[in-house]
Image (cartoon, coloured by chain):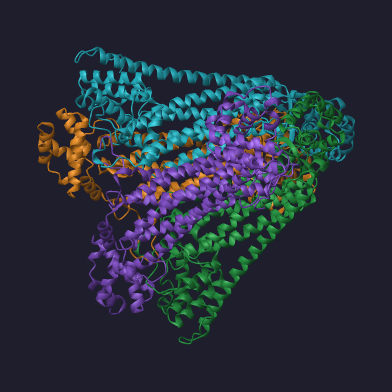
Chain colours: A green, B purple, C cyan, D orange
Amino acid sequence: MRTRLRQAPHPVVAKELIAAGIDADSASFGNVVRLNQVHAVLLDRAGIVSREQAQALLRVYDELARMGPGGLEFDLDLEDIHLNVETFVIGRLGRDVGGRMHTGRSRNDLNATMARLQARERIVAIVERAIALRQTLHQQAARHAASVMTGYTHSQPAQPITLGYYLGAVSDALGRDVRRVMRAYDTANFSPLGAGALAGSGYALDRHLASRLLGFAGLVENSLDAVASRDYLVELAAALAGLAVTISRLAQELYVWASDEYGFVEFGDDVCIVSSIMPQKKNPITLEHCKSKAGHVVGALVAALMATHAAPFTNNRDGNRELPAAVARSLAETDTILQLMTATLAGMTVHTGRMLDATRANFSTMTELADLLVREYGVPFRAAHELVASLVLDTVERNLRSDAIAPAEVVHRARQALGITVDEADVRRALDPRQVLEGRATTGSPAPRHVRAMLRRGRSEVRVDERWIARQRASAAAADGELQAEVVRVLAYPDGATPSPTRG
Amino acid sequence: MRTRLRQAPHPVVAKELIAAGIDADSASFGNVVRLNQVHAVLLDRAGIVSREQAQALLRVYDELARMGPGGLEFDLDLEDIHLNVETFVIGRLGRDVGGRMHTGRSRNDLNATMARLQARERIVAIVERAIALRQTLHQQAARHAASVMTGYTHSQPAQPITLGYYLGAVSDALGRDVRRVMRAYDTANFSPLGAGALAGSGYALDRHLASRLLGFAGLVENSLDAVASRDYLVELAAALAGLAVTISRLAQELYVWASDEYGFVEFGDDVCIVSSIMPQKKNPITLEHCKSKAGHVVGALVAALMATHAAPFTNNRDGNRELPAAVARSLAETDTILQLMTATLAGMTVHTGRMLDATRANFSTMTELADLLVREYGVPFRAAHELVASLVLDTVERNLRSDAIAPAEVVHRARQALGITVDEADVRRALDPRQVLEGRATTGSPAPRHVRAMLRRGRSEVRVDERWIARQRASAAAADGELQAEVVRVLAYPDGATPSPTRG
Amino acid sequence: MRTRLRQAPHPVVAKELIAAGIDADSASFGNVVRLNQVHAVLLDRAGIVSREQAQALLRVYDELARMGPGGLEFDLDLEDIHLNVETFVIGRLGRDVGGRMHTGRSRNDLNATMARLQARERIVAIVERAIALRQTLHQQAARHAASVMTGYTHSQPAQPITLGYYLGAVSDALGRDVRRVMRAYDTANFSPLGAGALAGSGYALDRHLASRLLGFAGLVENSLDAVASRDYLVELAAALAGLAVTISRLAQELYVWASDEYGFVEFGDDVCIVSSIMPQKKNPITLEHCKSKAGHVVGALVAALMATHAAPFTNNRDGNRELPAAVARSLAETDTILQLMTATLAGMTVHTGRMLDATRANFSTMTELADLLVREYGVPFRAAHELVASLVLDTVERNLRSDAIAPAEVVHRARQALGITVDEADVRRALDPRQVLEGRATTGSPAPRHVRAMLRRGRSEVRVDERWIARQRASAAAADGELQAEVVRVLAYPDGATPSPTRG
Amino acid sequence: MRTRLRQAPHPVVAKELIAAGIDADSASFGNVVRLNQVHAVLLDRAGIVSREQAQALLRVYDELARMGPGGLEFDLDLEDIHLNVETFVIGRLGRDVGGRMHTGRSRNDLNATMARLQARERIVAIVERAIALRQTLHQQAARHAASVMTGYTHSQPAQPITLGYYLGAVSDALGRDVRRVMRAYDTANFSPLGAGALAGSGYALDRHLASRLLGFAGLVENSLDAVASRDYLVELAAALAGLAVTISRLAQELYVWASDEYGFVEFGDDVCIVSSIMPQKKNPITLEHCKSKAGHVVGALVAALMATHAAPFTNNRDGNRELPAAVARSLAETDTILQLMTATLAGMTVHTGRMLDATRANFSTMTELADLLVREYGVPFRAAHELVASLVLDTVERNLRSDAIAPAEVVHRARQALGITVDEADVRRALDPRQVLEGRATTGSPAPRHVRAMLRRGRSEVRVDERWIARQRASAAAADGELQAEVVRVLAYPDGATPSPTRG
């Protein structure tokens, strides 16, 4: 093919650019074959090749499919997988037939289509992993819907919540991350095939049919846009970066809760390592990787964005090789992060006693105490807030825990400062984290009944996402079925005897 | 308020954290008032304050609305705008009434809601700017739908296209970028109000009503998620980064086309600067800024992602101050980029003669010459390709332009190499860029008729986006109308005389 | 000046590009004047202007220096500060004299020189801030050189250390960060002046003299490199990013140690904020900002790197406007981070009792117990390790703290498992964190005597850095003195009567 | 070893964390052995093991060195390479001897030391590659020291330069990049060995000797700092990012110059690829990869910075696994970039005629024409500038090239506008790019004599860098020699008979 050139590729070009590209494409060899089948069907329909030629081509493609990429001896002088396949086909069928297979197309639209097919597959796979994580979150959340713990803001004890409430919040955030990943699928799911090098072609090839046989939702219409754009991959990388950051937050918090000082949770031995010298150690390293691998995912996003920064708006290696390489890294790291976090959460033991005890000690019911005075005794909120603040300060200075506050003391202070008479039983309820939680009134609160309702909603979201996965797979399979039917049709009938296609 | 604390804020805290926050929030003072009005309505409905108290509060809010932030003397000891407003209100109404305004809410849900209201406004504004750019692209594309130019791949001449085709491709890519920005609106458009500090409250406040009065599509249900998450801002920043990169590609290409050597385009004097010493110079600096400002937008995305990297999943300054600050920068830079590119394109002069001449000279019709042999004379594509490749090589070595190729020479070579007789008129047509373009057959090709069809589609997309803008603004106005009606209702009737609300 | 152009700048160009540039340069107006003085001296020496003309120019520059930028009415049509100054000078002296001031130079080398002068000043200022932080670390480290705490790895208790040891480690890391910042100064400290637009000039202007009068260490020799490169700013931004990440690590750890559960440290009220509703809260927000502002610093580095990514290697706005804008942001954020952390640490209270108690409880002396068996009783390390591991496991399962381990129990197990007789007193020492620390033998260990030695080394590093600051300031002052002497000389003598310069 | 744990590592932990780590460390197996030898020498010297035990250990290490990592069957349950090696040694020598090899050290200081040894090797290798690129630049620059071309600013023709001048400027910038890389070596070149897990040890091990035997310049003294810090890797990654951006600028410019429209340069067939369908194409893809791979290098820097963002300041996987993985990617991509650019430049053909012709046509001598009037005829610069600007404008409007300007016309205009008589020969010289270049007077100008002087300076810088490489390698070899001498010494003498060491 390199007739225009008089030198073989330089070793670094051969190794780092050509061989690397062939390796990447070999991993999607099924799609290489599929694209050739689609094109043969189109050439046949348009009468650009004869029925016999189309049949010969399809038979060799069938051979290739059975062989897999291992059956080809790649010649790096041929620059990529497509020209290697063409050379193989010419070897089988001779130049007069084999030399027609590339009519009316280009490596550029082939590569653009390959990238979108691959993106679709990988997005479905990563969504599946993320769903597994959400399901694990839901399992633990269901188990701990009523397990009292302290809710923190700014890392300081704030108000009582439950662990199920916390895990449900993270799951909801993950749900939005997943939806962004799924939308990248929708963006990817358009067909660039038929765009040629950048300017379509003079052959009457049916781009809509090609799109349908590959299960796409429609065309990337402008043929230059079709070969120049990989924005769906940047969109995907951005969605994954957001997902990785969400998980890094959960990881950070579990990491702290697993400390000796908090002692709220403990992880399975299968996700920990020992120390080579410190006999007491059991190190939750998966959480460290969850946090720091987020850096790789963000870094890959930067690499993807920079790949086509200030690059001409057309087909070039910046967009069709380096950008996808960055996103492949992003997918691989995110996949590991998701597996690590799922495994870590699945084996997590919760020390509910310590969590409850901390909540009793750390003044996190003080807001409710103020609210009690407002709600039941008509005290202005700001006045109630100040009364309780002074109570807190005095208790802290006496080095006491909040559960050492005597209800009578509150009654006394309320009378002195506000001139009102507060019922001791009311105070006792306000100081008990469990009762505080039961009394939460607003939608979306940590009251266990609300937590369970939100979990039901979260689980139904996951079921919707599972159906989405099933639908995408079914749709790909249906398109493939239609393609194979077309192939069978071409192979079955001599020229002139084609039955009408069932659709379109 | 800092009764719990015995020191004023440190000067660097006061200046960089508190004053900076108050400045940012003052810019959305209308929303500060709006949130107070909504809350007063809710407190009234729930009977947490009396009708008279609600009326007093609403009257002071009205005064605040008329005054604007300039009417407040901000005390940095009060830490933020909300406590400053509360202090002002207490100053007007006394503590017994003013001290009730913050009942059942927190700065955390206020800040979370402020951020979403602001995001909605800014997204609509940036979409409007992006639409202006697309419209300018469409105007130039329509003007040059048939202006022949060379399509390049890898910066080398490839095949004839038209300038309108190129600009249409970029507009289509921008269209996808804009849609991503709009989807960030959809993600943002849920109400965190009523989430309190992180755990809702024990007051029966109607979160759904609050959401409706602010024009949100629904709730961020889990109250911890509501105060912990700013993912819609990261989604926005990512969409803007993609948009900036798309524009950087256009900028790069225009920058090269404006060179003396290409001489394809020239820009208005209003977007160029001179040299202080080189009298001949006219420098298209807006394109340089379009390219390099993309770096700020990507950098701001990194800052936004890192802001909550490994931060606890709860309310904290990482998420509610630093993350939004990064995204505000992203919006500001993108806004400038969009304006710069729109101004640059609007005044662009195109040297169509030079573009056509280059296309005649630079062998970009050679693919069509090969295709001619395939299509009309049944030559296998690969054989045709090689015949033409050898013709190109010989012509280049004789230092000739492609329009120096004599049709007869092609006829001669075809006879010699392939044994076929080619019609000279066919060859002449294949060598004429205009006729090549007319002969493009596939959907989405650069044939002027296809270019015009795609432009119609592009323009209708823009009209859809314009309607989207109108709809969001109408929806915000309608919600505001409903809020003001509620305010009027509370103000108009004494306690016990409230008419039924018209909705809900 | 815009004689070549027939339109005023477009509003967005005027506001975002020109006005923004003039604002940035006005902040360094002293350097604007200085560069004009240097150039007048050079023009005088080379005889390009007459002595009288040089004197007239220098007198106007003196007027400008006294006036400051506030005295100029900036005309945005003049594009930048330099042409505005020139117009002012021509207004004062007429075109025949004023029109000579820009002879043999260009805005390009002026801007390149301005940027380096400004970088020098800012680097010195930020180093000073970083030194203040190290000094605060050293004060706390000295106070707590022997305050026992647990050293953690993977967030799990590992071995006893002291707080002074920990803070000293962070200070050492900061010391390396600071040194990187200082090296950016060395890279910046070369003179691009005289490079003209990109190709020097035909005037015999003495670039070495110009360099000396501005206090530079030498020339950026190649004139194209001189106007094209801002690599010292990227180097600076990278050093600051590393510094910010180091501080984020300290911030994270202090943040956790300040939790209710750890309770190791507490911060001054001046760096905390309250809650609007939770009376017990005192939130250490400065640490959150120290962590999340690191994102801005890293983002600014990305912006700086991307600014000239794929930009031509020459003078352009990418390098001379957008890149410096990114680095200015990096400096501002780092400055705030340094101040925040210094203020936070300065007011930190340490609960040494809790730190010691945790160290007694959490098995962090177990390595020393194993080491004792190895060192004093000849047991192979791995065997000792396993004996202690089994002891730990049993103790943990009985829900006991490590200080509940009876020495006799160790003696018993050693006899049973290893057949050796261990002295109970030895065991007691090995289980006491203080004695473990005293027994640390290697250089750089947490033994208080080592900690104090390292602190002395750290303090002497800081003194070296302080002298560096003093030296840079003295050097800049000396150069300025030499420049003013040159100015005085030119102003004092009529043409032909110049005394020999004192140097060079 | 995992006696404390009761489960094998989870599959994802085993594959992604443990196996990945063992793979990475196996690539530096020589250093694994070296570290064991050093430690055996230290244990022997300190009398912690007997002479016989030391000899036995050293003999097994020798066996390991000969076997290589392929000789070990890695057990993933052992978590890393060091515990696998220890298990192998215990298998050979029994637990009584083999179980002593890990006395007084930890995986943490081993890993910290491994990372620094590897960094040193890789920095030397990458510097060597960068030197090769500078040498190639120098060869082309020497060839084209006097090859006239246009110097551009803002992509518009500015003033005449030479290609050698341009390439020399880029080489100077690269020289600074290389120096930054070398400084990362200096930062890396300190020994963490002996720091133990984070707190040194109670054994009297000589850290200074260990440092010397590994060729380090000194200690990372504080043992916590020693295991917690990987800042030298971030410094390296930042230097590489700067280098990659510098190369991206050169690549961008060559890419444009290789266009059909510029036609200034052409690249070897070995670095180009063809089109699958466009017979005329020859695509310079290496330049595209040089530009877009810079994104990977910047992304890896972001990943490295984020790895320890907000991570505790101690040993953890964030710093000791994920951060180095990011930097390894940075090194690999930079290595490819350097090779690609070197190969591309080495085979570059320059069309000097086209470059000269463009310079004659494009008004780039106009500054010199103005300068002529100033220098030789005393015209104020601004007046000269305006006269020439008006001449340019008129010429451009008549669609003429600058070499169509008649000297007599200039004489005429000068007389009319300024009342002076200019010599036509002077004008002719000012309009000739070659003579303009010869007349450049300032240091560092594009006058060929200056270009050649700068090239000599550049070449001598490269020689200095080559000597630096030689010195580092010699120093590593010398240290290794000293280590092997120590090993031989221990092996040669029975206990008590050790000769005094030659040094220390």
Residue D492 seen in the figure: no
Rendering coords of residue D39 (x, y %) = 67, 35
User: On the picture, is B434 further left or further right than B458?
Assistant: left
Residue B445, above or below A146: below
Using residue C189 as the reference point, say whether residue C289 is left or right of it. right
Frontmost residue, D190 versus B193: B193
Q: Pick the residue in front: D440 or D475.
A: D440
Q: Please tell me which residue is depicted at 43% across the width and 75% down the height of the picture.
A: A98
In the rendered image, the quadrant that contains the C terminus of chain D is top right
Residue D341: x percent and y percent? Answer: 40, 48
**Quick one: quadrant of the N terminus of chain D?**
top right
Q: Which image quadrant for residue A215?
A: bottom right
Say which quarter of the image contains residue C106. top left
Viewer-proximal residue among A181 and A286: A181
Q: Position of residue B348 (x, y in %)?
A: 31, 51
- Residue located 20% across and 45% down the image: D360
Residue A452 visible in the displayed image? yes
- Apparent side of residue A176 relative to residue D123 in the rendered image (left or right): right
Out of A317 and D470, give the one closest to the viewer. Answer: A317
Say how many tags the image has: 0
- Vertical comparison of A471 with B17: above or below: below
Left or right of residue A98: residue A171: right
Which residue lies at the image location 51% right of the left edge and 55% below the top edge?
B468
Q: Residue at x 70, y 23 (%)?
A: C349
